[in-house]
Every structure is written in C-alpha cells, then in structure tokens.
C-alpha cells in the first residue's frame, strides 16, 4: 500500500470516528442518560427467563424489551421538544422501515383477525404491538447516538451478553444439569435455532470490533468472544446459523480481495466471484421455493421434513390473499385450512401444529402479501444502499464496516430461509438498522447547536407525554406481565371454583394471547376432569365446563377461523356428555364445524367419530374413522381408532379385518394388534 493510499485510509477512519463536540447539561443530560442506560439494559434481554410465566423463554423477554423501548421512546419525545438535533432525519432506511410498518399495519387491519395480528401471543410476541416498539427503538437509536464510540459500546455490551449465553449453551451441551433450561436446548433462549440467530449477529459484531479497535485488549476480547459463540452455534446443531456464518466469511474474503488487494487481477477475481456468489444465492433461493426442484429435494432430505408441506400450504394461501396477505400472526388459520394430512407421519416430521412457515419469504408473503414482501426487501436494499454509498461515493466508511455489515445482513437473511424471528433476533436486527440510520445521517461537517439551559417550552405537552407513557406502560407491559404470571398460578388452583376465579382474573387482565390462553385452560381442565371424573361432583364438572365453553365461544365469535378452539369445544362437549347426554348435539355441531374448517385434518374426523360413538351410531363413526385413514394411510392412530370403534360396536370380525389391512400397510404395526390376531 502506497503512502497516498495509507493517508486516504486514515482520513476515512478519522471521518468515521471523528468525535463531535457535545456538552450536555441539566435536563438534556438526564434524558440522554436515561436513553443510553435503558439501551444498555435492553441488550440484556436474551438473559431474561422465568419459570413462573406461561412461556418462560419468550413472554417475559418480550415484555422486558418493550418496557425499556417505551422508557427510551417517551424520554426521546420529551427530549426532541427542546432539542431539534435529536429529531429523526430522513434517510433511505427510515423510509423503508416506515413503508414496511405501514403495510404491516394495513395487512393487520384488513387481515382475517386484526386482534391476533396486533397482540400476538406469549409464545411469539411478534405482532403489530412489538413492531411499533421496534420502530420506536430504531427512531431513538438512529437519532440520538451520533458518535461511533457510542455504537462501539453498545456492540461491546451485546457481545458480552452473547459470550455469557454461549458459555451457558456450552455447559448445557456438556450435560451439566444445572445449566439445562429446556429439552430443546438453546440456553436462555430455549431453542437452538433462536440461539443460532442471536449469536450470528454478535459473532459478526465481535469481528467488526476486532478490526475497529486499535487497542489489543479489545481485539483479544472480541476475537476471544467469537470462539465460544461459533462453538455454541455449531455444537447446538443450529445448522442454518452455522452455514450462514461460514458462508458469510467466504463472501467477506472475496469482498476483501475485491476492494483491499492492490493487484488488479486479484481485485477483478474477487469482484467476479462475489457477483457469482450473489447470483448463485438468488438462484438457490428461488429453486428452494420451487416445488420439485433439486434444491428443494436436497433440503427435504437433510432438513426438517415438516418445512416442505408448510411451504406448499403457504403458496396456496398466498393466492387467496395476494395483496396484503392474511395478516401478521394469522398463519395458524392458514395452517389448519390447508392442512396436509401427511404431517402426522414420520415422512413429514410428525409435527401437527405450526404458526410459522419457517421461511421468511413465504411467511411474509402469506401474512403480509406481495406488498409486505416488497417492503421487507426494501429494508435490506436501503441498508445496503447506505453502506455502499458511504464507502464508494462519500468515502466515509472503512472496508471492514462495509464488508462485515454487508455480509451480516446477507447471512441473517439466508438463515431466515429456514427459521423465523423472535424478540432477540429482532432486537439485534433493529440495533444494526439503527447503526445504519446513524451512518446514513453521518456528515463531514455538522454545525453544532448552541447549547442552552433545558427549559420545557411546552410543559403541557411534556405532561401529556408522561401520562401517555404511564398508560402505555400499564396497558402494554405491566398488565400482560401480570396475566403471564397468572396463567401459571391458575393451573395450581385446588378446586374447580378456585380455578375458575383465576381463569377469569387472567383473561380479564390483558387481551394478549387470549385465544391461546383460553384453549390452554380448556385443555388443562379437560385433562384434569378426565383423570378425576369419578372423584369430582357432577355439578362442579358442569360449572367448570360451562365457563370454559363460554370462553371458547368468545373465541369462536371473535376469530371464526380458529380451528384449535373449535376442536377443543368439540372435545369439551364430548366430555360434558359423560355427565349430561344432551350435550352430544352440540358436540356433533362442533365436530362438523371442525371438518368445515380443516377438511384434511384427521383430528376433525376423530372427534366427530367419538361423538357418534357416544350416540351409538357405529356406522357413521366407522365411516369417519375410515375417512381419516384415507387421508393418510401411513398414520397408525387412525387405524387404531377404527379398530376400537369396531370393537365397541361388538363386531370383532370387522376389527380383525381392519387390523389386517393396517398391517398390510406397515408390517411393523403387527405388535399393536397382536391381541386381535
């Protein structure tokens, strides 16, 4: 590298890291520090876990993060009343995110269930409510923090948290019981896929810190952090994150050849290979989503077998609502409407409940339509535009900032082709977008604002903001947190009356996740009553079932396409019939409704067959059982139900015949029917 090139490199680095003169005091200093300290606290979100909540690894994390987002956002609103320099500046990333949020909200409003789209549920927490908080998080970060040193500190703290979680995951993998929090591993994130996505971000941030910092202490810290992070990703079998991280390093190498080598031949080679890789990735993505392609077949052989049937269902559903989709968080309705009966089998993964497609393109397409997908791509395009413009045209960025953050977003997108986002990955995504917003606003010269004492120019407006914060924090953070804890407390009710009171209190506290909580309570009570049917007075059983049925009927009215609630109603009425035969009529009604909602789902026919069995209509019960068999002959349970119905009807010969037909399909089932043969 010649002297002129070295001077040019140093000049670029100086521009990027140039400290700005800032002298905050009084109220400005106080609000700025609240925002900064709360941002630091937000980065500890992945560590939040509580066994006393409904979904220990998701709900409280999300509420903790949203609570801090509200503190940050409302503090910022008060700050910008007096200091225009903290107000958001228009740039391509801001525009892209705003457009995406607009389409996200429109898809929710015009979707099949706006309430579900807004609130989401404790298991996911990724509805409109969360995205509003994320957008506020981005606005504040990109507007308030104007020095690279601020961002370096945020990234260093995030890396520290990631190292802690990586270490936890490695201890968990080593079999140390005290560190095992979930059967699905994943340390404090509860799932190896979520762990992999989170660590993917931080591994690249650590790599950036390594090249950004001149102090060898920080270089050792960052490079030392990559080791446990990648080890945790690889050993936890987070394959999508593993391949994406390694593939990203390969792309980074060719970018380095293209822009950092002095030999023209190597630079040309790097650019050509980089372009080839990008086109190859685009082609592979298209082929992955193309039914029957060799890429899809290869993925089917090596990946989760439930993914491909899900993608097939998503493609069908998209054609029904192509413009704005079914609405965020509404894939659960799509899933049951287009249910693939093979999902019960080993060949299709044996997982029969999905609320995500496990592919960011199809998930966005089916829930937000083509407009939402274009807007989502726009976020990535805007980020890349800022990076490359600042590097090539404005000469503000050093190569490693360009290369690492380009590769990070490519790797993140690629691994999301087989997984989906949760609060931890979305937090990291928006943290990096905030950094991109900061880079977009970076100017060679920025006129310093004349400082003055902090005086509220609009005291009444600031007061309104404080009131708005209190109301928002109560409604969207504290109340959902209380309801989350009450779910677990309700399950510990000692008798029917106590359970009902706790159920009511939980459902009245917050609407977040109300559909799922109602169905969950119904399932738990159903199991308890079935196991203690002879011990519980009939009046208590009726009272508890009446309450549960009334709650599920609210779901039926509010979200008519919610199959799980209708299925649970059919089961509850079948159970109710054991103490009141008149309820069989309603059991039949909801069994038929199940078939209407999900005609290819074996569960619909099983529950109605049970009703017909109680009505002693054995012929119809057998016909329903046979329909379930016809949907997917490779599923043993359908055959066993048909045999049991034949036995209940007293036709042992038919039972043996049905058992023999089952064994013809799979000889390994012979032991299941040995008493009949």
Image (cartoon, rainbow, N blue to C red):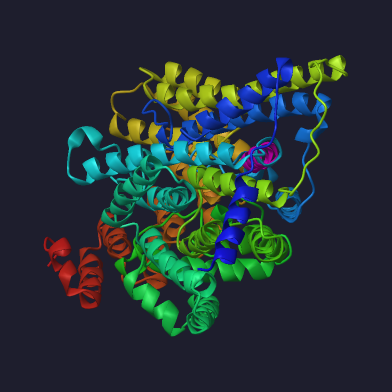
Q: Residue furthest front?
A: 3
324 relative position to 49: left or right:
right
Q: How many marks?
A: 0
Quarter in which the C terminus is drawn:
bottom left
- Would residue 208 be counted in the magenta stretch? no
Q: Is residue 596 visible?
A: no
The residue depicted at 43 percent of the width and 32 percent of the height is: 54
Q: Position of residue 446 (x, y in %)?
A: 78, 42
- Give coordinates of residue 236: x percent, y percent: 29, 53
31 and 335: which is toward the camera:
31
Q: Give the answer, above or below, for where 265 lies relative to 79.
A: below
State the predominant SS element of the stretch in magenta.
helix
Q: Is residue 149 visible?
A: yes
Left of 455 or right of it: where is 619? left
- Percent of width and height locating residue 77: 76, 28
In the image, taking residue 547 as reference, residue 612 lies left or right, namely: left
Magenta stretch?
Answer: 129-140
Asked where in the image residue 35 lies, by quadrant, the reply is top right
The quadrant holding residue 305 is bottom left
Q: Above or below — where is 364 with respect to 74?
A: below
Image quadrant where residue 499 sits: top left
Instruction: Please tell me which residue is depicted at 29% across the width and 23% down the height of the picture.
Output: 535
Q: Residue at x 80, y 49 (%)?
A: 90
Q: Residue 246 appears at what percent x and percent y?
A: 38, 65
| 167 lies left or right of 36 | left
């Amino acid at each position: 590298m010649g002297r002129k090139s070295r001077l040019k490199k140093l000049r670029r680095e100086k521009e990027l890291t140039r400290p700005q003169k800032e002298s905050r005091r009084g109220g400005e200093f106080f609000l700025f520090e609240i925002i900064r300290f709360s941002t630091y606290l937000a980065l500890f979100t992945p560590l939040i876990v509580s066994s006393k909540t409904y979904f220990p690894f998701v709900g409280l994390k999300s509420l903790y993060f949203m609570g801090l987002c509200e503190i940050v956002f409302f503090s910022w609103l008060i700050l910008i009343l007096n200091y225009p320099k903290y107000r958001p500046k228009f740039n391509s990333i801001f525009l892209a995110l705003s457009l995406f949020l607009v389409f996200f909200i429109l898809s929710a409003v015009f979707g099949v269930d706006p309430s579900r789209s807004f609130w989401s549920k404790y298991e996911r927490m990724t509805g409109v409510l969360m995205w509003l908080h994320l957008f506020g998080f981005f606005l504040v970060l990109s507007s308030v923090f104007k020095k690279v040193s601020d961002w370096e500190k945020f990234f260093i703290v995030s890396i520290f948290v990631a190292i802690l979680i990586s270490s936890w995951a490695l201890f968990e993998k080593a079999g140390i019981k005290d560190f095992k929090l979930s059967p699905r591993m994943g340390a404090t994130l509860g799932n190896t896929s979520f762990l992999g996505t989170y660590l993917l971000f931080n591994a690249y941030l650590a790599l950036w810190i390594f090249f950004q910092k001149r102090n060898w202490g920080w270089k050792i810290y960052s490079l030392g952090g990559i080791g446990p992070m990648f080890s945790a990703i690889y050993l936890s079998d987070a394959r999508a994150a593993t391949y994406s991280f390694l593939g990203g390093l390969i792309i980074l190498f060719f970018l380095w050849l293209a822009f950092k080598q002095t030999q023209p031949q190597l630079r040309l080679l790097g650019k050509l290979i980089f372009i080839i890789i990008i086109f190859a990735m685009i082609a592979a993505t298209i082929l992955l989503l193309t039914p029957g392609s060799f890429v899809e077949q290869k993925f089917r052989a090596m990946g989760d077998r439930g993914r491909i049937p899900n993608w097939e269902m998503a493609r069908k559903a998209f054609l029904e609502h192509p413009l704005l989709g079914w609405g965020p968080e509404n894939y659960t309705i799509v899933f049951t409407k287009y249910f693939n009966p093979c999902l019960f089998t080993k060949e299709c993964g044996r997982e029969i409940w999905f609320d995500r497609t496990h592919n960011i393109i199809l998930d966005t397409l089916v829930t937000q339509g083509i407009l939402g997908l274009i807007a989502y791509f726009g976020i990535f395009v805007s980020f890349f535009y800022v990076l490359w413009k600042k590097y090539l045209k404005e000469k503000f960025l050093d190569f490693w900032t360009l290369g690492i953050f380009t590769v990070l977003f490519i790797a993140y997108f690629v691994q999301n082709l087989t997984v989906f986002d949760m609060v931890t990955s979305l937090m990291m995504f928006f943290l990096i977008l905030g950094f991109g917003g900061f880079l977009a606003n970076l100017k060679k010269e920025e006129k310093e604002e004349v400082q003055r004492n902090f005086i509220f120019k609009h005291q009444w407006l600031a007061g309104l903001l404080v009131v708005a914060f209190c109301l928002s924090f109560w409604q969207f953070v504290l109340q959902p947190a209380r309801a989350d804890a009450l779910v677990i407390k309700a399950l510990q009710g000692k008798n029917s009356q106590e359970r009902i009171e706790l159920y009511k209190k939980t459902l009245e506290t917050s609407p977040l996740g109300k559909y799922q909580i109602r169905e969950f309570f119904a399932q738990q009570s159903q199991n308890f009553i079935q196991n203690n049917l002879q011990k519980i007075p009939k009046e208590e059983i009726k009272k508890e079932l009446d309450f549960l049925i009334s709650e599920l009927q609210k779901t039926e009215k509010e979200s008519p396409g919610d199959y799980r609630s209708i299925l649970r109603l059919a089961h509850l009425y079948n159970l109710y019939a054991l103490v009141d035969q008149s309820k069989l009529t309603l059991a039949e009604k909801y069994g038929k409704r199940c078939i209407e909602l999900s005609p290819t789902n074996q569960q619909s026919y099983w529950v109605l067959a049970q009703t017909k069995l109680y009505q002693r209509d054995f012929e119809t019960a057998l016909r329903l059982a046979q329909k379930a068999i016809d949907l997917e002959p490779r599923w043993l349970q359908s055959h066993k139900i048909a045999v049991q119905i034949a036995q209940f009807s007293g036709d042992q010969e038919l039972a043996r015949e049905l058992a023999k037909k089952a064994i013809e399909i799979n000889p390994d089932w012979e032991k299941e029917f040995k008493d009949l043969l």
